[in-house]
Amino acid sequence: MKDGRFVGKNCLVTGGGSGIGYATAQKFAESGARVFIVGRNGARLAKAAEKLHSETGAEVIAVAGDMSDEKEIERVVAEVGRQAGAIHVLANCAGRSVSSMLLDLSAEDWDAILGINLRAVFLLSRCVAKNMIAHKVPHGKIISVSSISSRMGEFGNGAYSVSKGALNTLTQVMGLEFAQYGISVTAVCPGYVDTEMLREVFETRGPLEGMTAQEYQDYLVGSVPMKRMADPAEIGGFIRFLATDEANYITGVALTMAGGKMLI
């Protein structure tokens, strides 16, 4: 355990079984938090919780739940509240993408992407905010993973881009409305992060632009001034910073972390 900045705090992380969610959970665990990781795949989640505990010594609890279902969201937050009492930090890291031209995109895929990337964030954030208010958490933190595609729509990635643009606006409104309760609401807009989801993007979106997966990877990474993808731990570390007391006066904003690819 590297430090004790989050000792005595309970952190809820969605998408905690892999990628940015796992890296974020790891950062909180390293700082002494009790971490609840949420995802749909219970077996994968349990393995992730066991690994995180082994690596950090922190208490990491897997809570399986489908964030596309409002009743499931309420059940998960109630279960975390039963075990932990107050929830001090919520990190909305779960996300979904599909590579498709808008002309070919099905209504079902549109609904599924906005359901996870936007609707679930709203419902879960509202539910957790009520827990924070009820427990009089002095500096509650809600942090969501957005994307640079929220700043500039991406070819073949329309529904995802729209969902993340709306997420930034949701962050603004929640920041304004939750400020009276001492709750800070922020979003992080990563660029290209070396995750399983991005590897799938190389495979599925590359052909839409007439490229192989490797050609598309080289094209995207080559457009980044730092000439590399981000490590998930870098995004997780920034999310952890936004949950510290040093960031208490930051709210209602979406902050870009993209190696110079996007400068707003």
Image: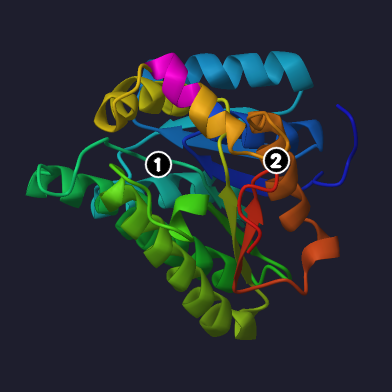
CB-based contact (under 8 Å), mark 1 and mark 2: no
Give the residue drawn at x 28%, y 51%: 158
- Is the residue marked by circle 2 packed among few (<14), some (14-19), or many (20+) residues within 10 Å? few
12 or 228: nearer the viewer: 228
Percent position of residue 229, x then y: 63, 30
46 versus 191 height, above or below: above
Residue at left 9%, top 44%?
Answer: 106
Residue 161 at what x, y percent from top left?
A: 36, 53
Tell me residue 224's x, y (percent).
Answer: 63, 39
What secondary structure characterizes most of the magenta part? helix
Give the residue at x 82% y 44%.
7
Task: Give the extent of the magenta segment.
Answer: 213-217
Where residue 129 appears, x then y in whole percent?
52, 67
Query: Can residue 147 be seen in the rendering of this structure?
Result: no
The nearer-to-camera label among 1 and 2 is: 2
Q: Amino acid at mark 1?
A: Gly
Q: Quadrant of the C terminus?
A: bottom right
Q: Is residue 168 visible?
A: yes
Q: Quadrant of the N terminus?
A: top right
Which is more toward the observer, 78 or 225?
A: 225
Q: Is residue 47 magenta?
A: no
Return the mark for residue 225.
2
Residue linked to disc 1: 95
Amino acid marked by disc 2 = Pro
